[in-house]
Amino acid sequence: MTFGVTLRERRLEQGLSLTGLSKLIHYSKGHLSRIESGDKRASEDLARRCDEALGARGELLSAHRTGSARRPSRRTSRPPFQLPPGASHFTGRHEETDALDAAAARPDPARGGSVPLVLIDGKPGVGKTALALRWAHRNAAAFPDGVLFHDLGAYGPAGSAVRPDEALTAGLHALGVEHGAEPADPRERAALYRSLLSGRSVLVVIDNAASADEVRALLPGAPGCTVLVTSRSRMAGLVARDGAERLSLQPLSPAESSLLLARTAPSGLRDACSGTVSALAEHCGLLPLALRIAAERLSAFPPGQLDGVVRELGEPEALLDFLDCPDDTTASVRAAFSWSYGRLGEDAARAFRLIGPRAGAGMPVTDAAGLLGVPEAAAARLMEVLRQNNLLELTAPGRYRCDSLLGAYAAELAVRDQRRTRAGARSMDASSRSSGNTDRPRRLSGDERNFVARCTHPISRPRSGRRAVPLTKARHSAPPRRRTPTPPTT
């Protein structure tokens, strides 16, 4: 443990303020503050006086002598600024920006001197990071001691996740600790990180986090800093225990979605009729990620074909194929959804596959219990797990819905799962016949057979004024399956 950290802990144990210690050892309060934060190197005389004043019996002198070879030092006086570039053509979010201003920019005295902590949560592709970066870039000047950016990569390609101790080490380096000089013990590393942030005005952005524990490891310990967190998880614990203010991000409005398409799409779409633009926005679930990908993909089509292409996107699987940039997994709606699905437990994943395709108009817990074959209390817990991961929305007490794109993805997963089940059953059947075994593999239950039948046809929202077509009828009256629209070859 460094001398500054040891001194601070000893001083706090004695209930002594910096002013009080300053009077005892005749060094200025500001000088002592910089030593505790690691900005200043303590002299042997100061270490001896502190040791005597605090009755440390040589502990502080020892910490000073042994830590001199690995003490943190400021490499530069320039504060860190680690923000990546913000999204181009940022659109809408005026109310959300005002809410961030109120929650993050002005500490509330009622919080008791704690660090302002804001959690931006929402479903995949809704624009959480874009909003956080937009606000951080616009308000960076309010934090003269710098901006730290920790991308924990919890929802991303395999191997992209960053452990909290790795993020702590990177934060220490950004705050001036030389490589190799950081404490080996994670608790000492966290203590030094908090000491370096103490008394400073720093904005800390923690992006793409999965759990409250990951966030807690990176929180400053004293007022002066502000923390923004983004996550697909609602992080109930961070709100309940740490006092985070939650800002749950919703999809853009239809008008904002059309404006984003107008800003990013090719001129042919900008010149298309408003009905075509509105239909494309609805197909994309009003999600910024999907809208941006759609705009890029449409650039490959001649203007005269855009109306027809948009009409063909009514089939969910074709739409998911279309909303994909093959050379970049971070620009794929299907991949974005898969990173949330991949973090679910087995029971919750099954619940998502079964409930997601059917909950476009909302599903009560009682129906979910029958579908899942579990008691209502168990169904309620599973639906709440999905809600906490922003894969379902709570629309009324005991009633949840799944948006169209997530529902299409869930149906795709369900069909894939049932195909594997049937392939496994055929394999077991062939094996039993070849071995003379008369035991038959388990047949699909009635619920499972019905589910396979229903999921082979995409579920669409009923238009206003029309009754929804029963799924069993929709399957038999469905038009021939369309292929994903492909641009013409030159």
Image (spheres, rainbow, N blue to C red):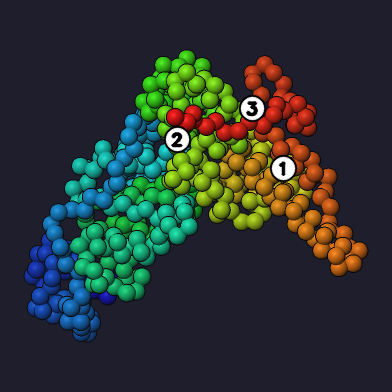
Residue at left offset 13%, top offset 80%: 48
Q: Element type at marker 1?
A: helix
Classify mark 2: helix, strand or loop: helix
Disc 2 designates what residue? 293
Label 2 crowd bin: few (<14), some (14–19), many (20+), radius 10 Å: many
Disc nearest the viewer among 2 and 3 = 2
Gap between marks 2 and 3 measured at Cα: 23 Å
Could you say whether the residue bearing mark 3 is in a helix, strand or loop?
A: loop
Is residue 10 visible in the rendered image? The answer is no
Residue type at mark 2 is Ile
Q: What residue type is labelled 3?
A: Arg
Closer-to-camera residue (286/277): 277
Q: Is residue 443 left or right of residue 26?
A: right
Task: Give the residue drawn at x 66%, y 38%.
Answer: 357
Considering only order in the chain, which callout, 1 or 3, is on the residue closer to the N terminus?
1
Mark 3 vs 1: CB contact within 8 A: no
Rounded to the nearest angstrom, the CA distance separating label 1 from label 2 is 33 Å
Residue under pointer 3:
461
State which tag comes first along the sequence, 1 or 2: 2
Task: Indicate the quadrant where residue 169 lies.
Answer: bottom left
Quarter of the picture holding the N terminus: bottom left
In the rendering, which numbered label is found on residue 368? Answer: 1
Extreme residue in the bottom direction = 57
